[in-house]
Image (cartoon, helix red, strand yellow):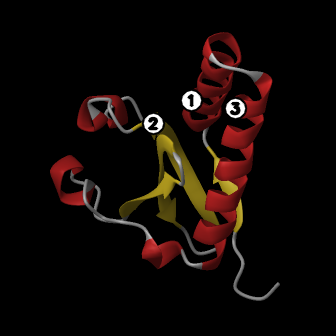
């Protein structure tokens, strides 16, 4: 598909996703965990098609001019990413209640 960039999650982003899935499995149900994965996939598809649509809200605060984020639909998570020439570099997938600047500084 023309204009569709590949999604390349960093190790920390993969760890964030694994932790969220495990949390949903323990605290709720497999159905909720699967819904989280579906929402993540939809977010990735949107970001791959329209990378500039994400919010740059934290970019200046963190000194990362190209950083954007996209929310995970009905789940309280945000996908943080940077658009590259050939792909989307996904840095983190963080719960929106977290101290985002502190967590992003781990990148």
| Distance from the alpha carbon under mark 1 to that under mark 2 | 7 Å
Q: Which residue is mark 1?
A: 16
Q: Residue at x 18, y 58 (%)?
A: 60
Q: Is residue 88 left or right of residue 68?
A: right
Mark 2 neighbour class, 10 Å CA radius: few under 14, some 14 to 19, many 20 or more: many
Q: Position of residue 78 (x, y in %)?
A: 45, 47
Q: Which residue is mark 2?
A: 94
| Distance from the alpha carbon under mark 3 to that under mark 1 | 16 Å
Total numbered circles: 3
The part of the image, by quadrant, that contains residue 19 is: top right
Q: Position of residue 41 (x, y in %)?
A: 72, 54
In the displayed structure, 102 sits above or below 41; it is above
Label 2 SS: strand
The part of the image, by quadrant, that contains residue 99 is: top left
- Disc number placed over residue 32 in the picture, else none: 3
Q: Position of residue 45 (x, y in %)?
A: 69, 66
| Distance from the alpha carbon under mark 3 to that under mark 2 | 17 Å
Label 3 SS: helix
Contact, CB < 8 Å: mark 1 with mark 2? yes
Disc on the earlier residue, 3 or 2: 3
The part of the image, by quadrant, that contains residue 28 is: top right
Q: Residue furthest right?
A: 1
Disc on the earlier residue, 3 or 1: 1
Disc on the earlier residue, 1 or 2: 1
Q: Residue at x 63, y 32 (%)?
A: 17
Label 1 SS: helix
Mark 1 neighbour class, 10 Å CA radius: few under 14, some 14 to 19, many 20 or more: some
In the displayed structure, 68 sits above or below 28; it is below
């Amino acid at each position: 598909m023309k204009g569709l960039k590949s999604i390349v999650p960093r190790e920390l982003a993969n760890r964030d996703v694994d932790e969220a899935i495990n949390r949903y499995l323990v605290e709720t149900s497999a159905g909720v965990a699967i819904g989280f994965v579906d929402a993540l996939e939809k977010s990735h598809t949107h970001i791959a098609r329209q990378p500039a649509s994400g919010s740059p809200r934290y970019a200046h605060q963190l000194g990362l001019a190209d950083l954007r984020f996209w929310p995970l639909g009905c789940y309280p998570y945000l996908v943080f990413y940077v658009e590259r020439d050939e792909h989307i570099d996904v840095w983190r997938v963080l719960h929106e209640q977290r101290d985002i600047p502190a967590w992003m500084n781990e990148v």
